[in-house]
Amino acid sequence: MKSIITLLGIAAALTFAPGLRAEEAEKEIKGEGLCLKCELSKADKCQNGIRVKEKDGKEVIYALEQNEVSKAFHSKICSGVKKVVAKGKVKKDGDKFILVASKIELDEKK
């Protein structure tokens, strides 16, 4: 009986494992890079954010986790809103989206 329960547990774990890996995959986010404090007054101190307009017209704000990549890029957007492309892992904290950026650059395409 214990072996059947163990096998069922392993089967369930394998079934849900691919879904977990998909959430951990890096995503590319394109939108308007801005400072959450200076531009939107949504933070106590300067922090990068990316504003994205969804297909349905809804606006989504991704707060960038404070890491080396985000901190190094901040000077480019603290003075104003600029088009950016960022790559990283997205996680959700309540109703907020947080991007752990591995790469950020200005979107030079017109």
Image: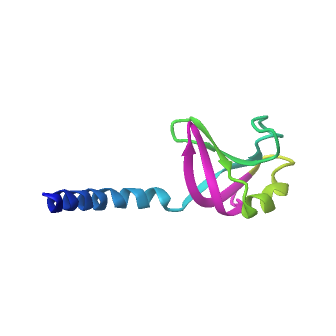
Q: Residue furthest front?
A: 2
Q: Nearer the viewer, residue 10 or 105?
A: 10
Q: Nearer the viewer, residue 14 or 31?
A: 14
Q: Residue at x 72, y 52 (%)?
A: 83
Relative image position of residue 14 (x, y in whole percent): 29, 62
Relative image position of residue 105 (x, y in whole percent): 72, 62
In this picture, which residue range is highlighted in magenta? 83-110
Relative image position of residue 80 (x, y in whole percent): 83, 46
Does the rendering let one see residue 93?
Answer: yes
**Left-right relation of 101 to 12:** right
Number of labels in the image equals 0
Q: Quadrant of the C terminus?
A: bottom right
Q: Quadrant of residue 44?
A: top right
Q: Residue at x 22, y 60 (%)?
A: 6
Q: Quadrant of the N terminus?
A: bottom left
Q: Residue furthest left?
A: 1
- The relative height of residue 61 versus residue 12 in the rendered view (above or below) is above
**Left-right relation of 3 to 84:** left
**Left-right relation of 60 to 49:** left
Relative image position of residue 70 (x, y in whole percent): 74, 58
Q: Nearer the viewer, residue 67 or 56?
A: 67
Q: Quadrant of residue 104?
A: bottom right
**Magenta stretch, main secondary structure class:** strand
Q: Residue at x 57, y 35 (%)?
A: 58
Q: Residue at x 55, y 41 (%)?
A: 54
Does the rendering let one see residue 108?
Answer: no
As for residue 2 lying within the magenta part, the answer is no
As for residue 108 lying within the magenta part, the answer is yes
Colouring chosen for the image of the structure: rainbow
